[in-house]
Amino acid sequence: MMKRAGYTWTQDADAQLVALKARGLSAGAMSEQLGASRNAVLGRLHRLRAAGDPRVPAAEPSPIGGKLPSASAPATLGDRLADLVADEDLSIEDAAARLGISKREALALWQTIVDRRGEQAA
């Protein structure tokens, strides 16, 4: 989909953005779905949060800033990949598309999952 300069945010576009965010898609994947730039997507999410829109949860803290996720933090990308493959019977390629990551990244995550489970079984 071609990205438009000066994307116009309508109520329908906001609703679609919120739904895509809830599915856990990356900003890049959301921008592809909406036809907006990645920066437009990130800016709109920021403005919706700042306006107190209850549909948009607060941004997750970055571990780079020294803050570590709490024990009740959302599942990691690897956990979400494993859930999609196991629970929804998706291929790794289809799960990667759903998560908005490359097939290569998904395969690397999958290998990490397999290696981790092998260590736990030993």
Image: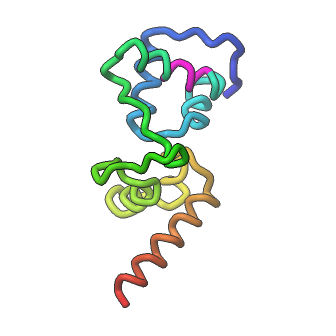
Q: Is residue 22 above or below residue 16?
A: below
Front in this rendered view, residue 82 or 58: 58
Decide whether residue 26 is among the magenta residues: no
- Residue 85, percent across and down? 41, 61
Give the magenta part as a residue range.
Answer: 40-45
Q: Is residue 21 above or below residue 55?
A: below
Q: Residue at x 48, y 61 (%)?
A: 91
- Residue 84, percent across and down? 39, 56
Q: Residue furthest bottom?
A: 122
Q: Is residue 116 above or below residue 94?
A: below
- Residue 16, percent across and down? 44, 23
Q: Residue at x 56, y 26 (%)?
A: 42
Q: Residue furthest front?
A: 66
**Tag count:** 0
Q: Quadrant of the N terminus?
A: top right
Q: Is residue 35 above or below residue 66?
A: above
Colour option used? rainbow
Q: Residue at x 32, y 59 (%)?
A: 87
Side of 69 relative to 94 (left or right): left
Side of 68 relative to 64 (left or right): left
Q: Residue at x 58, y 49 (%)?
A: 101
- Residue 65, percent across and down? 52, 43
Front in this rendered view, residue 23 or 63: 63
